[in-house]
Amino acid sequence: MTPIDPEEAARKKLLFEEKQRLSELPYFERDASDPDVGVLLSDRIRHYCGPDFQLISPMKELNLQPAAYGLRVGDNYTKNGERYTLNSGGVFEIEPYRVAIIQTLETLNLPDFLIGRWNIQISLAYKGLVWVGGAQVDPGFRGRLNCPIYNLSSEPVRLSYGDKLAVIDFVTTTPFLVTNTAAGEGSQAFQWWRRAKLFQEYNTSLQSGVAKDVQEIRDSVNASEERMSASVRAASAKTESKIDHIEARNDAFVVALFTVVAVLFAGLGVVATKGSDEASFFSSTIWVAAVALYFALRAYLCNSGQKVRPQEQTIASAEKRRFRLFWKPERVVELAVATLIVLASIGYHLLDARVSAKAIHDATEQAARATSALDRERGRVETEILLRQQADARLESLQQQLNALLKK
């Protein structure tokens, strides 16, 4: 014996109950006072919604219009292919570019002489909802209507249980002829008991292809943003590396500059005291040379003794890093070395106060070579600064492209 599937048994039970409910609706014929063809006005709709006819049940008087009736949001709906139930006071949203299928609250009981024509509520159409169902309800139909709705707008639309969803009007038909329909005669009847289905038995898995395309575009934009961010981070890291390199070269340039100045003034001090019988302990050129060497030593220590983080690389912090005050720990070492340099310079000046013309010539050539080296170093530093400006321009361009993508 084949075991009974509980879900299938439950479905059959619900379907039987639905058919039983619909079978209890009355069958009625056209009143003699109705015209042969025409649209039912509000009084005739109200008349046929009475207990003897039950054209619309439950019927809400406020939803009755001059020649139509406003159908309401019912208990069942699907969204993104998933089925949900909605109770009194419940609310749900239809996201942009998404499809929802909503079952009406009212049950229709159309006789053989009426057809229904329905469409979405105009107020919902102005919010961007588009109805994609069939426009006609055949004579003899019994049951609730399922309304497929597509949100064409870029904003979510909220719907509540009992809200007006669609508008239906009723049009009378030609007389129904009961003859041999198999022989091609008479009017074809709508056999509602064969077509009656539960809500979940309809194709309620309808989804929007546009939503899929939009999601793919969003995924592509997110991937592009990730790549752009990675490029910006790489460019930023490269720029920071360049900045560190340029600052190191600038510090090296400062060391070379003050060293050359020290050598130049030392040579001038020796020349200036040539021929003097008395040694000068306080020659201005000797002191300038000593001070220049002192600042060269300071630049070297500042460059090698501290590594600045990228977020601290501002002009003020760079200047403070190069020429910080004497309260730093290396002050004692700097002063000791500077004192030794000054004493050594004075001692050399005392031992060799007189120099030959050859020494003057050699000192001049050495100064010229130092000046030439200084010019070459200055050229290299200017090139590094130009490269840094170009890197900053590229980084700014990448940032503008990233901002443009984010605005989309």
Image (spheres, rainbow, N blue to C red):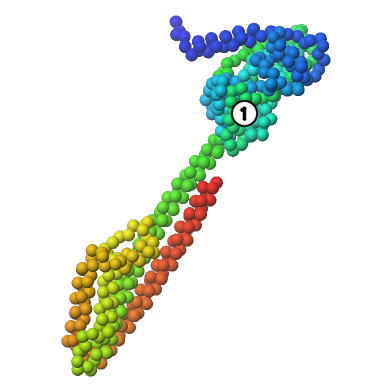
Which residue does the image show at 26% across and 64% down from the upper left? 328
Residue 123 screen position, x and y as percent: 67, 31
Closest to the observer, 270 or 36: 270
Residue 219 screen position, x and y as percent: 49, 41
Instruction: Judge the density around disc 1: few (<14), some (14-19), many (≥20) Cα neighbours within 10 Å.
Output: many
Residue 80 screen position, x and y as percent: 54, 29
Q: Quadrant of residue 104?
A: top right
Q: Of all residues shown, which one is farthest toward the front?
A: 327
In the rendered image, the quadrant that contains the N terminus is top left
Q: Quadrant of residue 210?
A: top right
Residue 152 vs 373, above or below: the answer is above
Residue 110 vs 325, above or below: the answer is above
Residue 352 vs 325, above or below: the answer is below
Which residue does the image show at 19% across and 76% down from the upper left? 340
Give the amino acid type for the residue marked by disc 1 in the picture: Ile
Closest to the observer, 62 or 153: 62
Q: Which residue is mark 1?
A: 149
Closest to the observer, 284 or 220: 284
Which residue does the image show at 45% across and 61% down from the upper left? 392
Instruction: Assign a secondary structure to mark 1.
Output: strand
Which residue does the image show at 19% across and 79% down from the upper left? 343
Is 236 placed left or right of 56 in the picture?
A: left
Residue 27 vs 118, above or below: the answer is above
Q: Quadrant of residue 282?
A: bottom left
Residue 149 screen position, x and y as percent: 62, 28
Is residue 140 at least partly visible in the picture?
A: no
Is residue 201 at least partly visible in the picture?
A: yes
Tag count: 1
